[in-house]
Amino acid sequence: MIYYVTVEKLHKLMIDVFTALKVPPEDARTCADVLIQSDLHGIESHGIARLKMYYDRIKAGIQFPETNIEVISDRKATAVWDGHHGMGHVIASKAMRKAIDKAREYGIGSVAVRNSTHYGIAGYYSLMATKQDMIGINYTNARPSTAPTHGVNPMLGTNPLCFGCPTNLPYPFLYDAATSIAQRGKVEVYNRAGKDVPEGWAINKEGEVCTNTPQLLKDLVEKNAALLPLGGVGELLGGHKGYGLSVIVEILSAALQNGSYLHGLHGWQDGKQVPFRLGHFFLAMDISFYTDPASFKQISGDILKQLQNSQTMPGQERIYVAGEKEYIKTQEVRQKGVAINEKLQENIQSIIKELQLPNPELGF
Ligand SMILES: NC(=O)c1ccc[n+]([C@@H]2O[C@H](COP(=O)([O-])OP(=O)(O)OC[C@H]3O[C@@H](n4cnc5c(N)ncnc54)[C@H](O)[C@@H]3O)[C@@H](O)[C@H]2O)c1
């Protein structure tokens, strides 16, 4: 049976779990803020569903609850940081905040980060910029899971690419998605639902289609299967373009910060689990250095409106723009709560039990 739990209860539970794992209170709140934003956006894979992953990684000692950021360089509009395997959400929030502060001073600001950990949804950090009338761009690399065009080895991560900007609509434009057809978290969602993944998402070492979800998750870790870049297998439907976008994300998440990349992000060394050593890239642009923000928002909003109002194809009721579904979903989730399926209920209960937290009265 599926239970719906209020955003407030889940957010508090997340804070309690991170705090019990010795994440300092202010940082625990930041981590919970990013996770709950994912549930609010309707991204099932990266919210409460990922709490166990962080719990396991902290317990395994490959991610540290205390975040100690080292500033490698700080020069006018740019900075390079080392996250020393602290909490990715905290490192990323602080890096985007720094990029925004620099943009306010110089028009643009950018921070490149190495040795970070999984930072959740990229959208959260671009929204930090749009709320300040700025453009926010950010990328992260991720453990290898995606094959290059014409290849079968999982070489690249699902490497999300995120762009956000303000508009004169009730929501910003927010493009926030993996550069693979499906991200690993979506495969996990299919796994929890006991469903096969669709044909076209992944291939095995022979280049054949994989749809068996538990097998795929195992094969991805053992490098016997790979996800496909946006556009899919080969070049016919533009697979090489998704592959190219993913490489851009990989380069900006590694080369500027002298960080790890490709198989350096595997999380295993000599048969032992090690930190993932992820890299991120953040860029904020202060619109007021280019033009009047009101005029920018009028034009960006008009672009979106014209797209929404163009003719739909037969069988489709409407045309969306990026960020719109998240806006609609946020209102729905605030009212109805976050859907928690049985596997996730077990997952949450096991964490509560192990950490001996007081009963959060979630209803299951
Ligand atoms: N931290 C990591 O390592 C990592 C890796 C991969 C993905 N992610 C995160 O996972 C989340 C989901 O990624 P995904 O690849 O599954 O996203 P997705 O395939 O659900 O695409 C989401 C994007 O597409 C837009 N969109 C959806 N339907 C649309 C439509 N009909 N018209 C126009 N735009 C539309 C949304 O507004 C959003 O910007 C993202 O938040 C991403 O940052 C994180």
Image (tube, grey):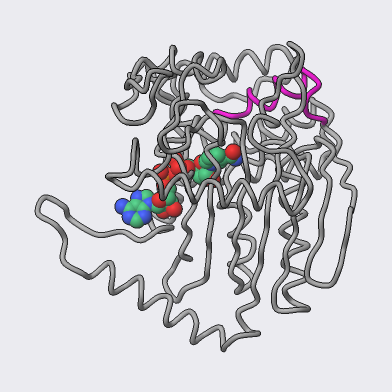
Percent position of residue 210, x then y: 35, 19
Q: Is residue 321 visible?
A: yes
Left or right placement of residue 341 versus residue 22 in this view: left
Q: Residue at x 58, y 60 (%)?
A: 127
Closer-to-camera residue (78/23): 78
Q: Quadrant of residue 97?
A: bottom right
Q: Residue at x 36, y 23 (%)?
A: 207
Left or right placement of residue 102 versus residue 335 in this view: right
Q: Residue at x 35, y 61 (%)?
A: 321
Percent position of residue 265, x then y: 68, 31
Percent position of residue 4, x then y: 45, 31
The image shows a total of numbered marks equal to 0
Closer-to-camera residue (155/119): 155
Q: Let me know if residue 60 is in the magenta part.
A: yes
Q: Quadrant of residue 291?
A: bottom right
Magenta residues (range): 49-64
Q: Quadrant of residue 267?
A: top right
The kind of secondary structure the magenta stretch mainly shows is helix
Closer-to-camera residue (40/138): 138
Q: Let me know if residue 46 is in the magenta part.
A: no
Q: Residue at x 28, y 74 (%)?
A: 306
Percent position of residue 337, x then y: 46, 38
Residue at the extreme front of the image, as rendered: 150
- Quarter of the figure with the N terminus: top left
Residue at the extreme left of the image, as rendered: 314
